Image (cartoon, coloured by chain):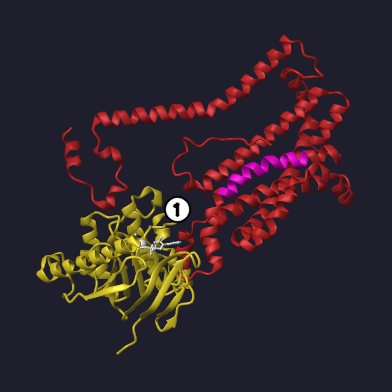
Chain colours: A red, B yellow
Amino acid sequence: MASDAALTATAPAPGTAAKAPADATMSPEALRRLQAMALAQRRRRRLQAWLPWLVIIGMFVIWEAGVRAFNVQQFVLPAPTAIAESMIKWWVPLLDNSWQTLMTTLIGFFLAVIFGLLLGVAIGSSSLLYHGLYPLLIGFNSVPKVAVVPILVIWFGIGTVPAVITAFMISFFPIVVNVATGIATVEPELRDVLRALGAKPSDIIRKVGLPRAMPYFFASLKIAITVAFVGSIIAETVAANKGIGHLMILASSRFDVPLVFAGLIVTAVMGVAMYVAAVAIENRTTGWAMRGQNDQQQVSVPGV
Amino acid sequence: MERPFVEISGVAMRYGGVEGTLALQNATLSVGKGEFIAVVGPSGCGKSTLMKLVTGLWPATAGTLLVAGQEVDGPLSIAGMAFQNPTLLPWRNIIDNVMLPLEVVEPHRRQLRSQRAMYEARAQDLLKLVGLGGFDKKFPHELSGGMQQRASLCRALIHEPALLMLDEPFAALDIFTREDLWAVLQGVWMARKPTVILVTHDLREAAYLADRVLVMSSRPGRIIAERIVDLPRPRTLETTYKPEFVSLVHDLREHISAARKGEEVVHGQ
Ligand SMILES: Nc1ncnc2c1ncn2[C@@H]1O[C@H](COP(=O)(O)OP(=O)(O)OP(=O)(O)O)[C@@H](O)[C@H]1O
Ligand SMILES: [Mg+2]
């Protein structure tokens, strides 16, 4: 095409180079290749989106087949169909109690976000605080939270409060550590850019420390939200009269194993939903840290 | 005569405690208000260190530093600095990076909200001046090294500092872009007359831009020679072919060679 050749001959002015679409100066063959690449990438994306569902369905199919083939007793391992049946039968208490657990978890989690951010910023920006508080934090985190629940019951009685506090305690630590790491590892060069302007320490934290810590913070949210569920359910199994943990304890005391599994699956679904929400927020807010590597980015669910 | 704007006398800098690297020793120089000086010297001789001492980013281990008659005892807010690395904040797009000093330095900080449009236009003009028009919404990682360096130069200029510290601002650029930017920088300087300290490895650049060129010895650095560039302004590329210019560059080159030989002697010990 003659017009194409003419376009390629004149170099675009520096200012317009950024905006001009690349295909304006492209030969048909190159265009075709580019389209083929885009198509392949789209296909890959589609596969990536479907893959988790395929894996999950596959797991249930194998599970079902295994249970049937080996004739496993229902109180040992119920088949997915039995679990589904139980879910349908008990959907009202399941929904009720998972709502309770969700609220408990979210309250504990948000408290952890607020205090975790504050403490993380403090620890990350002062090496005195860092060295002073870190050992205590590690010790605090090493205490098994199950052991703390009875104490919470003594203080606050049976109910929602111990569960909220357990969710808070367990999800607090990853947030603090990540935010502190993000701020403490700010490149000295970036800090110097601000210092050379005569910036106050608070300016440096606001303009360099916090933005720099955001990817760390959001990464920690993904972990924190999933462990927050663990925390609230632990507390519910020990000391509560509501919540999915409480429901599972009741069910297992009646040897209603399908219902226990139904509870587990509902918990897992809530955990994944919260995790996906955290990932969505992360992608929206800290795109700069990904540098267009979204293809390689994996959704890795941390084991707890 | 007026007092110099920047006075450095007997300054030494040792990194990392008593046993550390001695980067500068007995460095003495002064820069008049509105003067443009260039510092040249072999790699690793302490030029960047000198820049960081003058802006108060590091405390000197000996000697005195005065800027605008005041002892430098902490980071200066009247300085604009372009670092040797572009050091743009990766989470901000180019225009927000360029406008960063306005969010920190008074009186711009106070006025930024009410006069945002004016400041934004100023930033856009600067970007156009260095050939980055249309890249304002891009992020640093979407720009080449040389483009980032140009953006970082804009950031040093945006708040119109009285003292402009440029550490090899054009090192990552090709010779043609570089020569264009010499003219740009000269234009900015002639329009506003800030005091400029420019570090460079390019002797032609030093001779083109500066009123005075200082040559540093190899590490530990100190000033070993000084040449006044007595060429009329505005200088153009034509100027660089004049015999005075060529012989000045030649002269500087010999000083640098001597300085580098000195380094070898130090190594031999
Ligand atoms: N932060 C630091 N910690 C320890 N030593 C340093 C530090 N910065 C610089 N040095 C040392 O100080 C000396 C001078 O470094 P400087 O960066 O000032 O050199 P330079 O003249 O700018 O070199 P170049 O032209 O290569 O940029 C070097 O030997 C270097 O090893
Ligand atoms: Mg340097």
Residue at the extreme left: B243
Q: Position of residue A153 (x, y in %)?
A: 87, 47
Q: Position of residue A169 (x, y in %)?
A: 74, 48
In the image, residue B115 above or below residue A236:
below
Q: What span is colored magenta in the figure? A: A216-233
Q: Position of residue B159 (x, y in %)?
A: 39, 70
Q: Position of residue B223 (x, y in %)?
A: 31, 73
> Would residue B80 be found to the left or right of residue A178 on screen?
left
Which quadrant holds the C terminus of chain A? top right
Q: Is the magenta stretch mostly helix, strand or loop?
A: helix
Q: Could you say which is closer to the camera, residue A68 or residue B15? A: B15
Q: Does the magenta stretch include residue A140?
A: no
Mark 1: few, some, or many residues within 10 Å (few <14, many ≥20)?
A: some
Residue at the extreme bottom: B1
Count of all numbered marks drawn on residues in the image: 1
Camera sees residue A222: yes
For ligand 2, which image quadrant applies?
A: bottom left
Which quadrant holds the N terminus of chain A? top left
Query: Which residue position holds label 1?
Result: B90
Q: What's the amino acid at mark 1? A: Pro
Q: Residue at x 30, y 63 (%)?
A: B265
Q: Quadrant of residue B219?
A: bottom left
